[in-house]
Amino acid sequence: MKGARADRASGPPVADSAEAVASSGTGVTAPGGFRAAAVASGIKPSGLDLALVVADHTCSAAGVFTTNRAQAAPVLVSREHVAGGHGRAVVINSGCANAATGETGLRAARETAQLVAAAIGCAPAEVVVASTGVIGVALPLDPLRSGIPRAAAALSIEAGALAARAIMTTDTRAKEAVVEFTVGGHTARVGGMAKGAGMIAPNMATMLCVLTTDAGVAPPLLSRALTEAVGESLNRITVDGDTSTNDMAVVLASGVVPAPAILGEGRDYDAFRAALTEAGRRLAEMIVRDGEGATRVAEVRVDGAGDGGEADRIARTIAESPLVKTALHGGDPNWGRILAAVGRSGVAVDMDRVDIHIGPVWVAERGRARDYDEAEAHRAMTADPVRIRVDLHAGGGSGWMWTCDLTRGYVDINAHYRS
Amino acid sequence: MKGARADRASGPPVADSAEAVASSGTGVTAPGGFRAAAVASGIKPSGLDLALVVADHTCSAAGVFTTNRAQAAPVLVSREHVAGGHGRAVVINSGCANAATGETGLRAARETAQLVAAAIGCAPAEVVVASTGVIGVALPLDPLRSGIPRAAAALSIEAGALAARAIMTTDTRAKEAVVEFTVGGHTARVGGMAKGAGMIAPNMATMLCVLTTDAGVAPPLLSRALTEAVGESLNRITVDGDTSTNDMAVVLASGVVPAPAILGEGRDYDAFRAALTEAGRRLAEMIVRDGEGATRVAEVRVDGAGDGGEADRIARTIAESPLVKTALHGGDPNWGRILAAVGRSGVAVDMDRVDIHIGPVWVAERGRARDYDEAEAHRAMTADPVRIRVDLHAGGGSGWMWTCDLTRGYVDINAHYRS
C-alpha cells in the first residue's frame, strides 16, 4: 500500500504528480459506497449536462463555498443543506449557473433537491445542488424533472467518468483524481472530480469540485479536513483572478471501509487530510493546465516572509500580474516585473533584501540584477512547470500559488460576443 | 476668459474633452516662466532620450510618487529634493529606469541633478530627476555628462513639445495639455506633459507627469492641490493594474503672472486646483487611450456606495477585471462579469440591490437581468467611451475609474522575449 504523505501537505503539488497512486477507479466512484450517472437533460442544446453522484447510505458531508458576495442560488441552498453535516447526493447541472436569478432561482434550486430526494429516497436537505454555466438566465425545470429520474435509474459505479464529463463547460478535458490512504490498517480512498477553466463568454460560473471517500469521518472533522485541503490546493490556483458566483467544493464520506470512523485527531485523520489535499491538488493542477488559453503553467513560491499570510499575498500578486503572466507566455525571465509585483503587493517588504530565482537560475539578489546567464534563465522560464521563487529574507513565512500564462487565446475566448 | 470649473472636479473626465481651452502653448512651456529642451544623448540607441524643463527662477514645487515599495533611485532622490517645496528644473531620461540599481543608481541620480544644477546655475536640491525605461540596468553617465549641457544650451519656449516626445518609451503619441484659469483677475495657465502606456518588455517603468503653472502658489498649497488633482485624474486610470517603480507627478509654479500668489484657500485656490485637475485628467485620458494594445476605453462609475473609498475599490475591481476588459474588447455587454467583480471586490455589498447600466441601457436591476435590448446594449458597449455605471443603493458614496480593453495586442507587446 502506498499512502499519501502528510509531510508533503505544505509543499507545492507538482513534484507529487509522478507519484500518483494507481487505482482501479477514476474519480468520485472509486471509493466504496458511491454510484454516479450522467444524462443529456436538455439544459444545453446537446450533450451531457446533468450529473448525479449518490451514496448508498447517508454520508458525513462538508462543503466550502465561493467568497463572492454574488452567490448563486445553488450555493445558498447547498450551504444550508451541508450545514447539518450529512448528505446522500450531489446533483450538478452544466449550461446554466442559476446565478443572479433571485427568488425564482432559489425555488428552482430547492426543487432540484426535491426531485433528487424523491428519485433516490432521501430528505431534500441531504442533496447538494451545484450549477455551472451562464449567469443571469433562469434554470429551466422541465429538463430536470425528466432528467433527474432518468439519471437516478442509471446510477452505476462505472459512470463516475461520465459524470466528470457532464459537468464540463469550457473545460477541454475531464478532471478526475483518486488517492489511496490507510485508516485503521485498511486501504481507503479519496476520489474526486472538478471542472473549471476560467470564466468565459457569455459568462460561465466556474469551479466545482466533488470529493468522495469510503473512510468514515465525523462531520466536524470532515469539514475541517476539507477546509485545510482546499486551502492547500484549490485556493492556490488562479487563471484570471476572477472569482465565480458558483464556486463550490463538497466532500461526502461513506464510511464503508471496514475500519473505525475517524472521530478525532491523530494518525488516521492526518492520513485522510493528506489524501484529501493530494486529490485537491491534482484536480487544481488540472484546472490551471486547462486554464483558458493556457500554454504554460508556473508555481510561484514566496519564502522568508513575515508570516504565511504575507507570503500568500505576495505570491498571489505575482501570480495574477498580467505582466508576469505575459512574460511567462513569452518565456521571458523578466524578473523586474516580479520585483515590481512584490513591491505593490501591499506587504511592507524591504526591497533591498529580495532575492528572485527562476528555476535553478538566481536572477536577482538584494533587489538588484545578478550576472546570470540569459539563455539559461530563458530555458528556466519555459520549463514545465516554471518555478518562480522569491525570498524576502525577513522571516519564516512561506506561501505559493499556481498560475498559467496570459495569451491571445485567453483574449479570443473571452472577447467573443454573445449571440 | 473661460475658466476650468471647480464644480466638475468630482466627475469623470471625458465629458469635458470637447471643452478643451484653446491655448497658444502645447504643454509644459505654455505657462509663463518655463523653457524646455530635448536631445538625443545616447542612452537609447537612437532618438530623443533626454528632456529638460527649466524655470527662469526658483519655483514652488511639489511631487507625488509611486506607492510601489520598489522605488527607483530617481524617485528616492526627487522625493528628497521636492520635500523642501522649491525647484528650478526637471530632468527626465528615457531608455533606462535606473530602478533596482542600488547605491550605484542613487549616485547616478544625484550626479544627474548635479549636472543640471551646474549647467543652469542652481542648487542640486532644486532639480527633480525622473527616469523611465528598462529596470535593473545601470544608468550610463557619459550620455548625461555630454547631453545635459547641450540641452541646457538649447532651452526654448518652443521646445516643450520636443520634451514631451523625448520622454516617450512605448507610447505611440506624445501627451500634452494646457488649461487656463483666472487668478486675481489675470489669466494663468497650467501646462503638462506625461508618458505612460502600460509596462512593457523588457520592463518599462512607466507613468511620469510634469505640470507647470505661471500662477504663484505657496508650497504647502501646491502640494495639496497636486495630491487632490492626481487623486481625481492620474490615480483613476488603469491599463493592467501593475504599478511601476518610477511613477512620479511633479508640478512647478513660477508665479510670473502679475497676480498675488495663492497663499490660502479661496476662489483662486479652487480655480487653480480645478485647472490642475483638468490638466491631469486630459493627460490621464491620453494615457489610457494609448494603453498597450488598447482599442476601446471605458469609464467605470460606482454610485450609491457606503462611502467614496468603497466606491473606488469596487470601480477599480471592475476596471481591472480581465473578464470585464476582454468583454469590453469584444463589445459584449456582459453584465454578469461586472456583477461578479462587484461581488469579489471585498466590499460588503448587498447584491440584491445592485443595478448595472451600460450607457443608456439598464441591463440589471436588483442583481438580476432586466429585459433589455441586446443590440442596443451591444451598441452601448462599443461607444467611445463605454460608460459602465453600477448603483449599489446603499449610500451616497461615488467613485470612478478609467480603463481600456484587454487585447491580443497587449499580449503580443508584453510576451515578447528580451533579446
Image: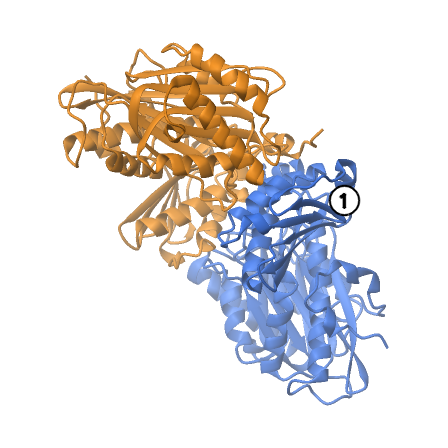
Chain colours: A orange, B blue
> Which corner quadrant of the image does residue B294 belong to?
top right
Pick the front one: B67 or A213: A213
Q: Residue furthest bottom?
A: B260
The spot of residue A191 in percent (x, y) is: 33, 21
Residue A395 in sight from this viewpoint? yes
The spot of residue B218 in percent (x, y) is: 63, 84
Report the number of numbered marks. 1
Which residue is painted at 28% across and 18% down in the image? A21
> Does residue A396 sit above or below B214 in this rendering?
above
> Does residue B132 sit above or below B215 in this rendering?
above
The spot of residue B147 in percent (x, y) is: 65, 63
> Which corner quadrant of the image does residue B335 belong to?
top right
Q: Name the residue under label 1.
A: B380
Where disc 1 sits, the SS reads: helix
Q: Which chain carries label 1?
A: B
Around disc 1, counting alpha carbons within 10 Å, would you say few (fewer than 14), some (14 to 19), or many (20 or more)? Answer: many
> Does residue A173 sit above or below B158 in this rendering?
above
Pick the front one: A224 or B87: A224
The spot of residue B270 in percent (x, y) is: 70, 79
Residue A365 horizontal side relative to residue B308, left or right: left
> Where, quadrant-wise, is the N terminus of chain A in this rendering?
top left
Residue A300 in sight from this viewpoint? no
Which residue is painted at 63% across and 36% down in the image? B412
